[in-house]
Structure formats: C-alpha cells, structure tokens
Image (spheres, rainbow, N blue to C red):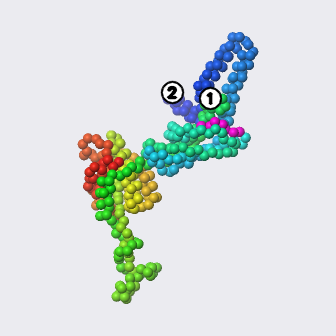
C-alpha cells in the first residue's frame, strides 16, 4: 500500500490541484493571528474580521474553480518534428460557459508528464469565445513524443492560491533526427558512384532505347518510319528515360549501449543524406537492420524515410542481428543496381570506442567523412 499511495495521489491531483502562493501564505498567517486575538480578547470586531478573511478564502476557491470549468482545448502541431528545430504549435481554448468569463488563465502544454511549452497567459476569455495561442516547440529527443494534455491554472481573484486543472488531450508526433550539412568528401564519393550506377530504362527522353512492333493504343507520333518502310511493318520507337541514380542507405541497428551516441550520429547522418539526395532526384531505399523501405522519390517518400529514421531503435547485438546488419558487401545483393551507402556506428572488430560512425560507399571506406554527422 505505501508504494501505491504516490501513484494514487498523482492520479487524484493530476486533474485538480491547489497550491498556496507567497501572498496566500502571508494571508493565512494573518488570519491565524486574527483568530488567536479574537479567542483571547472575545472582541466582536476581531470575530467579524476573521469571518471576512475566511470568506475571502472560500470565495477565492469558488471563483477559481468556475474560471477553470467547461473549457475546451485543442492542439495543432505538425506530424513530423526535428531534433533542436523549433516549430510553431497552437493551442485553441474555448470557454463553453454561457454566462461566466474566465479570468487570468495560464496555459502550458504537457508531454511525458512535464511541460514542453512556456507558460502562455490569457487575461480573460468571454463566454462562448475562443482564442488561438501559439508557442515554440523544440524537441530534444528522437522518437515518439506523447503530448498528453494541457495544464491550465489561475490565481483569480485575489492571488492567494494557484488552482490548476489538467485537460487531457493526447497527440503523438514523431521526432526525426537532426538534419545537418553533409561532408563534401562524402558527397564527391557518392555522386561519383551514383553516375556509375545510373539505371537505364524506357521512358521520356531523346536517346533510342528499343524498337518494337506497333500495338493497339500506341501513339502514332512514335512510329519509326525508316524501319517501317524497310520491313513493311509498323514499328514503334521507344526512347530511354533520362539518367536516374539510385542509392541504398543502410544503417545497422545492432549496437551496444556503450555506442548509443555514435548510433544517434549515424541516424542523423542518414537523415541528412536522405534530405540531400532527395533534392538531387535520387531514387532512395532505406534499410534499418531487417527493416527496409521501397525505392522512391519525391517529398512524400522523403517524409516516409525520415519517419522510419525517427522511430528506429537500437538493439543489443546477437549473431542473427549482426548477420542481418552486415552490409559491407551488399552491392551484389541489390537488385536493379544502385549505390550502397553503409553508415556503421559500431563493429565487433573495432578496437576502442568511438562516437563517430564509419561510412562506406559500395564497400569502400570514405576517409575523413566520419565527421559528416
């Protein structure tokens, strides 16, 4: 029972709590002095003053409770956040009371049982009115951020007590790794390998890809007339699409706890590469341990990859996980070609500890690029 009491008290006082202010403490001491004087002297004026002061305490509790009642709170926050990157979040608070105004409100957003926003003051909220309040949200840890609710407090009307109410409003957002500039040496090695691994396929372009017989539904403008005249059969000219480069970014997840900082750097570097290569029209696939994405391009695919990186977890190395993470010779296992970039935060053959990841492009270590993260 003694171990369950703190949890029970936390649940009870989470939604409603009252704290005394420094002015309120002085007021209570004065009330106590007036009460002692009234008992010792029997003076009716002291009793009258004591009753008036006690009524202030009662009125303060009732007025504060009505200020905090029947408030509706909504939150607007982006689906994806980035470490150490501030974003603008909004709280919409509405007074659902039909007659009473709420005064002197202070709001703070709560995530993981602690405030994640600065206190936002609202002097008054008329009956039926709503206000939009914005604040800067700067996450500091990667992963899921649970925003559990909004804490509203008031010291109305006399400032003797701070009464708090907790409005549950759960939202879960994904915090992605921090995006940082990529090392120039890594970019040179990546682009050089990317041109060698360009994928040739049919599509819109100017170079000849193939000649084939005409089929129903083909565009007549694609008929290759010299071949048609020579063979007496309608022949279609297929063009080769513009050069497309593909990249496979591999981040092993079997990392000891002692290399947790290096793993976070590797994840951040992978996110930075995804951001950079997307802007250069690469078709990207991401492999995190045994998890892998499909090849894709564009903004939607970039957000999916960043979400994967934001949610990936380090696991304790085992024989199976180390075998799945072995991408040092992965180029032969990639279907359709592509540049393989391995961001290795730890190796079992490594001597000593380091907080900087190793980077390999098509199995070749890129020297000096460990500082790219």
The secondary structure type at the circle numbered 1 is strand
Q: Nearer the viewer, residue 292 or 228?
A: 228
Question: Where residue 243 sits: x, y (%)?
Answer: 36, 67
- Rendered view: 99 above or below 338: above
Residue 283: quadrant of the picture: bottom left
Q: Is residue 288 left or right of residue 81?
A: left
Q: Residue at x 27, y 56 (%)?
A: 363
Label at residue 79: none
The kind of secondary structure the magenta stretch mainly shows is: strand
Instruction: Specify start and end residues of the magenta stretch as a single range.
Output: 100-106
Q: Nearer the viewer, residue 351 or 299?
A: 299
Q: Is residue 199 left or right of residue 304?
A: left
Residue furthest to the top = 41
Query: What is the spatial separation of the Cα atoms under label 2 and label 1, in whole angstroms?
Result: 29 Å
Q: Residue at x 61, y 22 (%)?
A: 26
Instruction: Determine contact: label 2, label 1, CB under 8 Å.
Output: no
Q: Does 24 lie within the magenta span? A: no
Q: Earlier in the sequence, mark 2 or mark 1?
A: 2
Q: How many marks?
A: 2
Q: Does 102 lie within the magenta span? A: yes
Label at residue 2: 2
Q: Is residue 138 left or right of residue 347?
A: right
Q: Residue at x 39, y 46 (%)?
A: 313
Q: Residue at x 69, y 45 (%)?
A: 128
Camera-nearest label, 2 or 1: 1
Q: Which residue is mark 1?
A: 161
Q: Nearer the viewer, residue 275 or 110?
A: 275
Q: Can the viewer see residue 68 in this picture?
A: no
The secondary structure type at the circle numbered 2 is loop
Q: Can the viewer see residue 36 in this picture?
A: yes
Question: Where residue 33 sits: x, y (%)?
Answer: 65, 16
Residue furthest to the right = 44
């Amino acid at each position: 029972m003694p171990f369950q009491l703190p949890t029970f008290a936390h649940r009870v006082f989470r939604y409603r709590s009252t704290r005394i202010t420094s002015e309120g403490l002085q007021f209570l001491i004065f009330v106590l002095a007036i009460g002692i004087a009234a008992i010792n002297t029997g003076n009716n004026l002291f009793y009258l003053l004591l009753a008036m002061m006690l009524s202030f305490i009662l009125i303060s509790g009732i007025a504060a409770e009505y200020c905090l009642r029947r408030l509706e709170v909504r939150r607007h926050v982006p689906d994806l956040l980035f470490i150490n990157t501030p974003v603008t979040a909004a709280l919409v608070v509405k007074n659902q009371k039909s007659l009473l105004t709420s005064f002197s409100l202070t709001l703070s957003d709560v995530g993981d049982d602690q405030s994640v926003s600065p206190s936002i003051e609202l002097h008054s909220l008329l009956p039926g009115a709503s206000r939009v309040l914005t604040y800067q949200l700067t996450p500091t840890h990667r992963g899921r951020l649970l925003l559990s609710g909004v804490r509203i407090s008031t010291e109305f009307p006399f400032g003797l007590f701070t009464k708090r109410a907790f409005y549950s409003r759960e939202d879960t957002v994904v915090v992605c790794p921090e995006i940082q500039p990529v090392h120039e040496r890594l970019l040179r090695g990546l682009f050089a390998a990317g041109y060698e691994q360009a994928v040739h396929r049919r599509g819109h372009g100017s170079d000849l890809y193939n000649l084939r017989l005409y089929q129903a539904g083909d565009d007549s403008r694609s008929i290759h007339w010299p071949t048609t005249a020579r063979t007496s059969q309608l022949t279609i000219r297929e063009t080769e699409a513009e050069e497309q480069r593909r990249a496979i970014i591999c981040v092993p997840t079997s990392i000891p706890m002692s290399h947790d900082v290096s793993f976070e750097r590797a994840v951040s570097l992978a996110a930075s590469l995804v951001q950079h290569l997307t802007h250069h029209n690469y078709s990207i696939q991401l492999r995190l341990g045994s998890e892998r994405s499909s090849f894709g391009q564009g903004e939607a695919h970039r957000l999916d990859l960043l979400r994967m990186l934001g949610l990936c977890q380090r696991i304790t190395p085992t024989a199976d996980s180390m075998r799945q993470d072995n991408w040092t010779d992965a180029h032969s296992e990639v279907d359709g070609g592509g540049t393989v970039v391995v961001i290795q935060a730890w190796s079992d053959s490594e001597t000593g500890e380091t907080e900087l990841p190793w980077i390999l492009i098509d199995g070749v270590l890129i020297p000096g690029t460990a500082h790219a993260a």
